Amino acid sequence: MAQDHNEIRVRLVTPERTLFEHTAQSVELPSKAGYMEVLYGHAPLLAELGAGDVTLRGGPGGDERYNVNWGFVEVLPDRVTILASDALKPGEIDVPRAEKQLDHGLALWKQAGESEEAYDEALRIIAEAEAKIASASQP
């Protein structure tokens, strides 16, 4: 795979499959602390992945977008490896299923009471469902 001076190699992997591995001008991804954009030469970083869209800009097939849920990202100056527990193209998202997941998360949130663990799990389910619904609704 030929690599330009200002391009980074980006790899998106789930436990089931490698979704892509090629070069891009930049990649935007959801960390637990919020979205970040990575360009060639970025300082090394290991971060926890959140729920949201990974957007690849300037790849060989143009811009690409994938919805990811949880995992880790390793950033090195010339490459980014995204290890996600789940990743889908927006067109692969089952919106009615995501809406049921959102309802389930909201019900868990209401029942969490004083349990911080139950509250955190409910928020994780809600964030994942909302990210899927948002991703599927974007053009």
Image (tube, grey):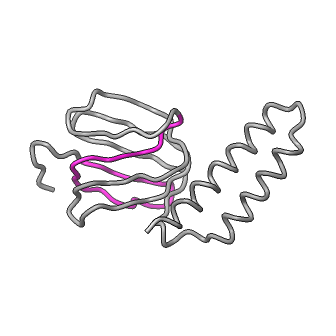
The residue lying at 41 percent from left, 31 percent from top is: 46
- Predominant SS of the magenta segment: strand
The residue lying at 22 percent from left, 56 percent from top is: 58
Nearer the observer, 86 or 104 = 104
Q: Quadrant of the N terminus?
A: bottom left
Q: In which image quadrant can residue 121 be found?
A: top right
- From which residue to which does the magenta span run? 9-32
Magenta stretch encompasses residue 131: no
Q: Is residue 90 above or below residue 38?
A: below
Nearer the observer, 97 or 85 = 97
The residue lying at 21 percent from left, 38 percent from top is: 40
Q: Is residue 25 above or below residue 133?
A: above
Q: Please give left or right for residue 12 compared with residue 99 in the image.
A: left
The residue lying at 90 percent from left, 36 percent from top is: 113
Q: Position of residue 85 (x, y in %)?
A: 54, 51
Q: Position of residue 100 (x, y in %)?
A: 74, 65
Q: Please give left or right for residue 61 compared with residue 49 in the image.
A: left
Q: Is residue 107 above or below residue 34?
A: below
